[in-house]
Image (cartoon, rainbow, N blue to C red):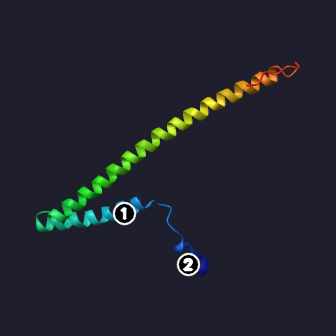
Amino acid sequence: MLMEITRKKSEPSVFPAFLKASSSSDDHQDHHHHHQIMNGGSSAVDEESTNVHRQTLMEENQNLRREKVELQTQIAQFKDLQIKLLDCIAQHTGTSDHKETRLC
């Protein structure tokens, strides 16, 4: 049982790296926000870090939108192929009694 526990600890996480960074960054931001309230201000380094994080998220969002469009295009193409294939099968089964069959 100890080997299972050890093995489980060494398995890679199923979460993408950007989500890990985001969650640890959120914890850091919560801690930092509390620190800012206690000190009454923010620093340029923290604002830069927030801007970098925001820029990273914006880029990831843009990449995901692009990928979504590509996948939707592929789905539409596969649906068209499915319809053509089903039409071809229907023609073949409809003309199976005849000697001449039409190729799709």
Task: Judge left or right: residue 17 versus residue 84.
Answer: left
Q: Secondary structure at mark 2?
A: helix
Quadrant for the N terminus in the image: bottom right
Residue at point 32%, 55% (across, down): 56
Q: Are marks 1 and 2 in contact (CB under 8 Å)?
A: no
Q: Please tell me whether residue 62 is drawn above or below residue 12 in the rendered image.
A: above
Residue at point 31%, 61% (across, down): 26
The answer to which quarter of the image holds residue 98 is top right
The residue indicated by pointer 1 is 21
- Residue 16: x %, y % from top left: 45, 59
Q: Residues within 10 Å of mark 1 (few under 14, many from 20)?
A: few
| C-alpha span from label 1 to label 2 | 24 Å
Residue at point 51%, 35% (across, down): 73
The answer to which quarter of the image holds residue 24 is bottom left
Amino acid beneath label 1: Ala
Task: Judge left or right: residue 5 versus residue 101.
Answer: left
- Residue 15: x %, y % from top left: 47, 60
Q: Secondary structure at mark 1?
A: helix
Residue at point 60%, 35% (across, down): 78
Q: Residues within 10 Å of mark 2 (few under 14, many from 20)?
A: few
Quadrant for the C terminus in the image: top right
Q: Which mark is residue 6?
A: 2
Amino acid beneath label 2: Thr
The answer to which quarter of the image holds residue 54 is bottom left
Q: Please tell me whether residue 99 is drawn above or below residue 76 in the rendered image.
A: above
Residue placed farthest to the bottom in the image? 2
Q: How many marks?
A: 2
- Residue 27: x %, y % from top left: 31, 65
